[in-house]
């Protein structure tokens, strides 16, 4: 069974304090790994898709990387507006079903 | 450009009542999905529609039915609501299967 584990469950950072969020996965055949951001009371918002080990994507203060077993979302010099829950999901092509992790709640203090 | 629009935003039902959650997208996407999100659990797929005219079960379809009314609209029906269906329901769409999802802002459903 496909599994996605995100860690830590919650992370509190000071503004400017860089860190990384982890998404580890156990799947039979990866066809894509997705990162989403979810603000309270809103639907998830797409951030990145990664397809193969070694791939990297960047957007503003965020950089996503992928290995054969895990993905990292690196946050450089975060700001309070980066506070949100970050979701990771994997697509194995099995009926095109995405398996989502439980999310990491990030809080950035000014 | 509204994206994915869900109605209603909030709903309270009594056990045994029925209701339909509505979803519409204006991005000309082919695929549409219904997910539920519960505390401490990841998003779980209820049903999806790969293209107009097709629907398929996801991970947790029991107690739900869906209708792909046209390319824009995908509705989710609860025939006889149960307290276990208390959740936040998200509709999503994508250009095709496997491409990134675009989500609505959810319907918060409470069944008493």
Image (spheres, rainbow, N blue to C red):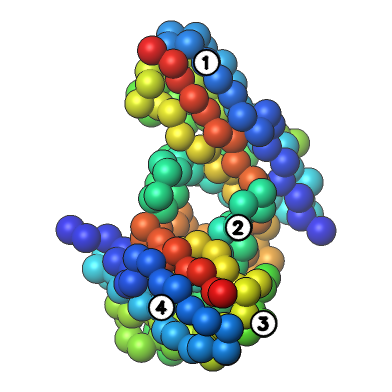
Mark positioned earlier in the residue sequence (2 or 3): 2
In the foreground, B85 or B111: B111
Q: Chain of mark 2?
A: B
Residue B26, given in percent of the width and then of the height, sits at 24, 68
Label 2 CA crowd tier, 10 Å (few <14, some 14–19, many 20+): some
Q: Quadrant of the C terminus of chain A?
A: top left
Label 1 near label 3: C-beta < 8 Å? no
Q: Which residue is mark 1?
A: A13
Labels 2 and 1 positioned on one and the same chain? no
Residue at point 68%, 37% (across, down): A6
Residue matched to label 2: B38
Calculate the distance from the C-alpha at mark 3 to the C-alpha at mark 4.
16 Å
SS type, badge 4: strand
Give left or right: position of A18 versus A94: left
> Which residue is labeled 3 in the image?
B62
Is residue B65 shown left or right of residue B25? right
Q: Secondary structure at mark 1?
A: strand
Number of the label disc, if any, that sits on residue B21: 4
Q: Is residue B98 above or below residue A68?
A: below
Q: Give the residue displayed 55% in from the left and 43% down from the top.
A: A87
Task: Determine the secondary structure under disc 3.
Answer: loop
x and y percentages locating residue B12 in the rendered image: 45, 73
Distance from Cα at disc 2 to Cα at disc 1: 26 Å
How many angstroms separate mark 1 from mark 4 (CA)?
A: 38 Å
Q: Is residue A110 left or right of residue B42?
A: left
Please give the name of the residue rendered at 68% of the width and 66% of the height, measured from the top-left corner: A94
From the viewer's perspective, tell me whether residue B17 is left or right of residue A104. left
Q: CA distance from mark 4 to mark 2?
A: 17 Å
């Amino acid at each position: 069974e496909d599994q996605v584990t995100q860690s830590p469950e919650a992370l509190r950072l000071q503004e400017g304090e860089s860190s990384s969020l982890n998404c580890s996965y156990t799947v039979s055949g990866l066809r894509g790994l997705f990162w989403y951001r979810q603000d309270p009371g809103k639907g998830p918002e797409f951030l990145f898709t990664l397809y193969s080990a070694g791939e990297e994507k960047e957007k503003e203060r965020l950089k996503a990387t992928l290995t054969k077993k895990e993905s990292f979302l690196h946050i450089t010099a975060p700001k309070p507006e980066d506070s949100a829950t970050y979701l990771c999901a994997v697509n194995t092509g099995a009926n095109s079903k995405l398996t989502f992790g439980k999310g990491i709640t990030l809080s950035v203090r000014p | 450009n509204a994206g994915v629009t869900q109605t209603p935003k909030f709903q309270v039902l009594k056990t045994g009542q029925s209701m339909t959650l509505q979803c519409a997208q204006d991005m000309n996407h082919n695929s549409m999905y219904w997910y539920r999100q519960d505390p401490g659990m990841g998003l779980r797929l209820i049903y999806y529609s790969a293209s107009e005219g097709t629907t398929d079960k996801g991970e947790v379809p029991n107690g739900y039915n869906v209708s792909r009314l046209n390319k824009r609209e995908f509705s989710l029906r609860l025939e006889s609501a149960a307290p276990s269906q208390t959740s936040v329901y998200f509709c999503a769409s994508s250009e095709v299967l496997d491409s990134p999802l675009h989500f609505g802002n959810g319907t918060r459903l409470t069944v008493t």
